Image (cartoon, rainbow, N blue to C red):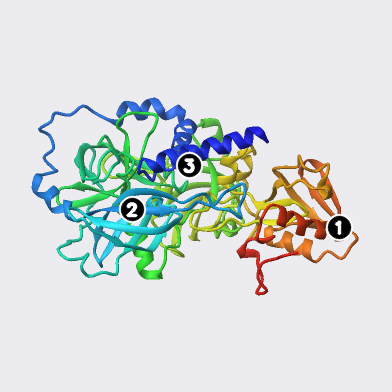
Amino acid sequence: MLFRFLQTLARFCSFLLISVMGSRFSPLFLLGYVKLQDENHHNSESTLASGTDTKQPDAAENVTSSSIDFAVNSVVKVFTVSSVPSILQPWQNWQQQESSGSGFVISGKKILTNAHVVADHIFLQVRKHGSPTNYKAEVRAVGHECDLAILEIDNEEFWEDLIPLELGEIPSLDESVAVLGYPHGGDSLSITKGYVSRVEYTQYAHGGTTLLAIQTDAAINSGNSGGPAIIGNKTAGVAFQKCTSSDNIGYIIPTPVITHFLTAVEENGQYGGFCTLDLSYQLMENSQLRNHFKMGPEMTGILINEINPLSDAYKRLRKDDIILAIDDVLIGNDAKVAFRNKERINFNHFVSMKKLNETVLLKVLREGKEHDFHISLKPVPPLVPVHQYDKLPSYYIFAGFVFVPLTQPYIDSTLICNCANKNMPEKAGEQLVIISQVLADDINAGYTDFNDLKVIKVNGVQVENLKHLSELVEKCCTEDLRLDLENEKVVVLNYENAKEATSLILKLHRIPSANSKDLQSEKGPLIY
């Protein structure tokens, strides 16, 4: 418990330090990207070797002073006041923090910025370049998976003399790029220049999703987030993250990802997520493996290991199928497909660019025979949510036991094993419910070290999610309440005594309700 407290305190202090410096790159954001480097350590040498090249100072022919002058007046500074919920005490919020980021004007009187710039916000303001006035802003839509957000300002004075920036194409390698924004260290607009080093499928640290990204050696620092990357007289993308373990490696969200997000918001009124096939696979680079699955000498593809039961692919594909091609584009044994001029990219890029409920054609090898399957695509929530931005955490308290659904932020904040997030859900709405902590009382004596254990059953009934657990407890009609936990642990409580103890525990800890708002009925908070 002491170690968990110190770990949480250190994380909080780190968040305070970064926020005071005017940045919105949260510790989880930075930690997530460092983790990406650790997980891909075997690729780090080739990545760094080809990441940045030394250029002559007169080679920035794609970024002219006129194009930058045009873009400058469209870049804004975003001021955010945010309040982040406590993960270990989900009925509380941390003290509000001030941070800042960047953004730029797009068509339709909208401002495009990063989702992590406005995450968990309670108040937003925007300031134009060269203006002393801050204008109140509202979030129109946000996509945490792609780290993008749309802001709106209901003040015609703000939009005077502002010209929206036009989205361009994916830049070629070695093209020069200028990044505009408001990094910390000053209050005025900053312009940095560099070159496109790589275009590849990359993990987005904020949302934990893997999507297309542009790598550049242009300086991208805390506060640059949300600013435009300019090539010629168009926007090549949005600056959003950097590699913290290396120098001069920053990343830009490219226009196909931006367009996908904007189109979804325009057509559906809100952002619905990026589609995936919802399956796990392995590479087919071993000749013995290919021979075992009866692949011809010219065949290449990937081997399906597991399929999410909630996906459409589960109805048509099987374990041990070989996916040979997607929309008639051959998939290599390394899971990559042809992309632009002699470039290759992971096949999932094509899937992620599909709209909700669109189909993809897969050519599959099954027991030596080829088959074609049309798979309908939709985002499927993971069993363990990757993030919990802009929402209050769920919790339920009974007899001092604090029950919460397992999430990646919770895993990052505790010592709990990370292996659970590899599991796939078996039914819609399924959650892994754990005991976050035990608020000490006579009623739970002997159980106070049952932290971070999964709840399997309540009175013999399998737990589906947190709401189901709370209903099972509230409707208990036996003298004793029995909880079956992982590792064969068992909790037995006298039900009536436990209800009385719950009321006292809530008062002692100044907890307003025994359950979070999403679990409350029309009668309001649960108070014993």
For the question of whether residue 187 can be seen, the reply is yes
- 168 or 218: which is nearer to us? 218
Is residue 299 among the parts visible in the rendering? no
Q: CA distance from mark 2 to mark 3?
A: 20 Å
Q: Measure the C-alpha gap from mark 1 to mark 3.
A: 41 Å
What residue lies at 67% left-to-right and 61% top-to-bottom?
Answer: 515
The correct choice, above or below, for 378 with respect to 183 in the image is: below
* 469 on left or right of 32: right
Along the line of sight, the residue nearer the viewer: 205 or 311: 205
Label 1 CA crowd tier, 10 Å (few <14, some 14–19, many 20+): few
**As drawn, 312 above or below 116:** below
Q: Secondary structure at mark 3?
A: helix
How busy is the neighbourhood of tag 3: few (under 14 within 10 Å), some, or many (20 plus)?
some
Amino acid carrying label 3: it is Leu
- Three-letter code for the amino acid on which mark 1 is drawn: Asn
Secondary structure type for disc 1: helix
* Helix, strand or loop for disc 2: strand
Mark 2 lies on residue: 79
Which residue matches tag 3? 28
Numbered tag placed on residue 497 in the rendering = 1
Amino acid carrying label 2: it is Phe
Where residue 383 appears, x then y in whole percent? 61, 52
Which residue: 55% across, 56% down? 381
